[in-house]
Amino acid sequence: MLPLSEDELLILLKLSLSDSLAFPLELIDIEVLLLKLREVEADSLELNDINSLILIDIDCELLKLSLIETELLKLSLIETELLRLSLIETELLKLSLIETELLKLSLIETELLKLSLALTEADVLSLALTEADVLSLALTKAEVLSLVLAEADVLSLALTEAEVLSLALTEADVLSLALTEAEVDSLALNDVEALSLALTEVEVLSLALTEAEVLSLALTEAEVLSLALTEADVLSLALTEAEVLSLVLTEVEVDSLALTEAEVLSLALTEAEVDSLALNDVEALSLALTEAEILSLALTETELLKLSLIETELLILSLIETELLKLSLSDADVLKLKEDDIDCELYIEVLPP
């Protein structure tokens, strides 16, 4: 049976009190009912306690859930901080990349400065070489002019030798006119000797011609050396040579006039003058020796010119070698820079994102 409520119990008590006379035995049942009511109240209290405990458990669970939510919020905050740190790391990486780019630009600027310095050094060296070439050209011009003057002197000396020989012949004519017929007979043998002397004089003239050929060979060597000159220098040298040749021709004409005058004067010479002319022959021989010495000096000058040209070529080769060494050093610097760039890129790739 279901338990009675309090109202129902009170109604029953009233009925029992009203009917106490009719129902004397039901008092015991009322007490029993009261006891049952107390038990029911105790059960209801226990039920309330159980419900309160259940509510407390629910509150505890809710608190646990709130704690879990707070922990989750803390974790989300930590995640946001980690994201901020990752953003800061990305910014630092960007800055490091910018620094590497700046370093590359600075290296490129240094390389450009090195190249500009190398170009300026090359320009200075080229200017020095051009100055040396100009000086060498001026020296070659002066040497060519000196050689031309020496040739003119040699030609004038050869003409003086021819004059001396012509004077000797005129002296022989004067002596032959002054001799008697008997002396003419005795001088027939001397004529043979004079012919032999004339032959020797012809040989001397041929030697003078060979000397002129040697001088022409020296001129050809000088022309070979002057091939390095510019066209303007060659034209100027050709003009100077033409002027020298014209001067030589005028000197030859003057010498021919002097020969005619010498022939006129030689007719009036005395025997003492003949002796002095013999001394002049000795002087002419000494002049021939000096001409040979001049030719040897000209040959030594050509050898010195060749040596100077060889020295200039060696200097040019040494300059080329220095430039090659500089280029090799610049290539080594470029390789080092490339290796450094590769190391930087590898380091950037190894860094965590």
Image: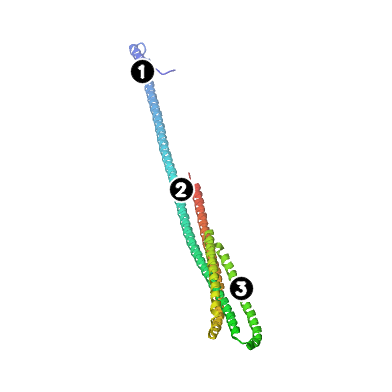
- Residue 225 is drawn in which quadrant? bottom right
Q: Is residue 96 left or right of residue 209?
A: left
Q: Position of residue 67 (x, y in %)?
A: 40, 35
Q: Position of residue 138 (x, y in %)?
A: 49, 65
Q: How far is the residue under mark 1 from the one under mark 2?
A: 94 Å
Q: Nearer the viewer, mark 2 or mark 3?
A: 3
- 133 and 186: which one is in front? 186
Q: Position of residue 112 (x, y in %)?
A: 46, 53
Examine the rendering and report whether any part of residue 292 can be seen: no
Q: Which residue is mark 3?
A: 209
Q: Secondary structure at mark 2?
A: helix
Q: Nearer the viewer, mark 1 or mark 2?
A: 2
- Residue 49 is drawn in which quadrant? top left
Q: Nearer the viewer, mark 3 or mark 1?
A: 3
Q: Using the image, determine if residue 95 lies above or below residue 249.
A: above
* Point 40% across, 31% down: residue: 62
- 66 and 132: which one is in front? 132
Examine the rendering and report whether any part of residue 58 can be seen: yes
Image quarter where the N terminus lies is top left
Q: How far is the residue under mark 3 from the one under mark 1?
A: 175 Å
- 283 and 343: which one is in front? 283
Q: Residues within 10 Å of mark 1 (few under 14, many from 20)?
A: few
- Circle number at residue 322: none
Total of numbered circles in the picture? 3
Q: Is disc 2 in contact with disc 3, using a CB cutoff of under 8 Å? A: no
Q: Which residue is mark 2?
A: 101
- Circle number at residue 6: 1
Compare marks 2 and 3 and give the one earlier in the sequence: 2
Q: Using the image, determine if residue 45 lies above or below residue 211.
A: above
